[in-house]
């Protein structure tokens, strides 16, 4: 099984798995990720919320034989800047929904 490392960023109220938007597209998950996740200004990173979307990504990667190893970053004293990023939509990562 291959291993991939992803940042897991948390603050006192929530956590997000940082996943390249190209990975979301390659896994065919662009329409599965919810608006509770966030997208970087460049559109290159999707911050998948911990309650559902991070698990969706991890499950899809495991099905391909990839083990996810999170590297944790804790924003213990302040809210994470992720909260101020735009909410996820397929269009935010260049996916056109017809």
Image (cartoon, rainbow, N blue to C red):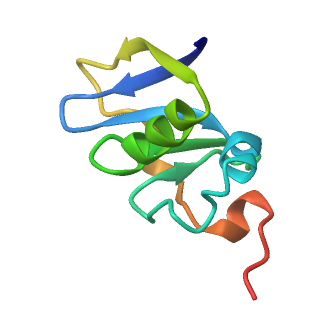
Determine the image quadrant of residue 4. top right
For the image shown, how many numbered marks are present on the structure?
0
The quarter in which the C terminus is drawn is bottom right
Establish if 65 lies above or below 36.
above
Tell me: 77 left or right of 72. left
Q: Nearer the viewer, residue 84 or 74?
A: 74
At x 42%, y 23%, the residue is 8
Determine the image quadrant of residue 6. top right
Establish if 44 lies above or below 38.
above
Q: Residue furthest bottom?
A: 98
Q: Nearer the viewer, residue 83 or 3?
A: 3
Q: Position of residue 58 (x, y in %)?
A: 46, 35
At x 24%, y 18%, the residue is 76
Tell me: 38 left or right of 28. left
At x 25%, y 38%, the residue is 14
Tell me: 74 left or right of 8. left
The quarter in which the N terminus is drawn is top right
At x 43%, y 47%, the residue is 56
Establish if 64 lies above or below 46.
above
Q: Position of residue 67 (x, y in %)?
A: 51, 19
Q: Position of residue 53 (x, y in %)?
A: 41, 50
Q: Position of residue 26 (x, y in %)?
A: 75, 47
Tell me: 34 left or right of 43. left
Q: Residue furthest left?
A: 12
């Amino acid at each position: 099984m291959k291993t991939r490392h992803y940042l897991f960023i948390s603050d006192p109220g929530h956590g997000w798995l940082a996943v390249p938007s190209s990975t979301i597209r390659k896994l065919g998950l662009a329409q599965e990720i919810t608006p509770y996740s966030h997208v970087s200004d460049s559109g290159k990173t999707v911050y998948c919320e911990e309650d559902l979307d991070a698990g969706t990504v991890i499950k899809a990667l495991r099905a391909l034989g990839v083990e996810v190893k999170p590297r944790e970053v804790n924003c213990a004293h302040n809210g994470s800047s992720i909260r101020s990023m735009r909410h996820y939509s397929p269009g935010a990562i260049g996916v056109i929904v017809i």
